[in-house]
Image (cartoon, rainbow, N blue to C red):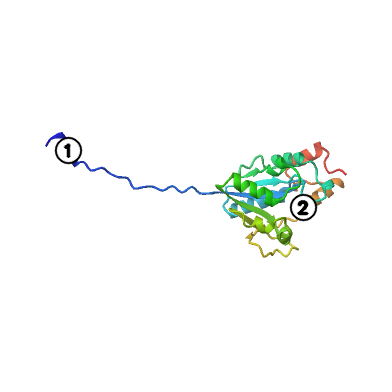
Amino acid sequence: MHSNEVVENVQTQVQPEVKVFNRRKRVGLYGGTFNPIHNAHLFVADQVGHALCLDRVDFMPDAKPPHVDKKHSIDPQLRLQMIQLAIKDNPFLGIETSEIRRGGVSYTYDTIKSLVEQHPDTEYYFIIGGDMVDYLHKWYRIDDLIKLPHFHFVGVQREGAKNETAYPVIWVDVPEVDFSSTAIRERIRNGQSIKYMVPDAVAKFIKEHQLYRD
């Protein structure tokens, strides 16, 4: 047999085509004023993130919330620093700073529209309490918001709220921790302890900067 006959008789092994499917990133967004961030915020973020198998949960502090008296909300950079201190040892938690960078009144529709355009490979899960779920019908451009691609509302039930809406919401059962940023600010004004209500690093920051004293 000649060498060219050997070549002609060799059969090429064709490898089957392998299709690679890129899974979308699953990112939780926990929006709010975080004035200050506290342990209940951290607890909810962790519980929701793991219940929905998210890749991470990002806290998203607002610049100027449309529903809060501006006199009661301290500078966003101070609130941002406290979030950084609160999550520094937990790689599962992050920060989304788009609303602070944009400035002005923070509307969820504007923020989410920008994020889904910038990150088309990401599925966003926006975490809100049941009391906010009750008022979704009053949110700015809510009908346009729920039509945005790759966006979902995640609701955490709150005692005293109706916890219901006509809009699509993914509900996650999270044990309620009964204290708020408002209660923490009040305790600080009254000279009461906030230990175990906020991370120690946040409590130290509040004391060093004399926040919420008046």
Location of the C terminus by quadrant is: top right
Q: Nearer the viewer, residue 100 or 117?
A: 117
- Badge 2 is on which residue? 180
Mark 2: which amino acid?
Ser
Disc 1 crowd rating (10 Å Cα; few below 14, some 14-19, many 20+) is few
**Is residue 58 shown to the viewer in this render?**
yes
Helix, strand or loop for disc 2:
loop
Location of the N terminus by quadrant is: top left
Q: Nearer the viewer, residue 209 or 99?
A: 99
**Left or right of residue 32: residue 123:** left
Residue 4's spot in the image, x, y percent?
Answer: 16, 35
Q: CA distance from mark 2 to mark 1?
A: 81 Å
- Badge 1 is on which residue? 6
Mark 2 vs mark 1: in front: 1
Q: Which residue is farthest left?
A: 1
Residue 203's spot in the image, x, y percent?
Answer: 77, 42
**Left or right of residue 12: residue 61:** right
Q: Which residue is farthest top?
A: 3
Please name the residue shown 68% across and 49% down the image. Answer: 110
Q: Nearer the viewer, residue 11 or 109?
A: 109
Helix, strand or loop for disc 1:
helix
Q: How many marks?
A: 2
Residue 13's spot in the image, x, y percent?
Answer: 27, 44
**Is residue 174 shown to the viewer in this render?**
no
Mark 1: which amino acid?
Val
Please name the residue shown 30% across and 45% down the image. Answer: 14
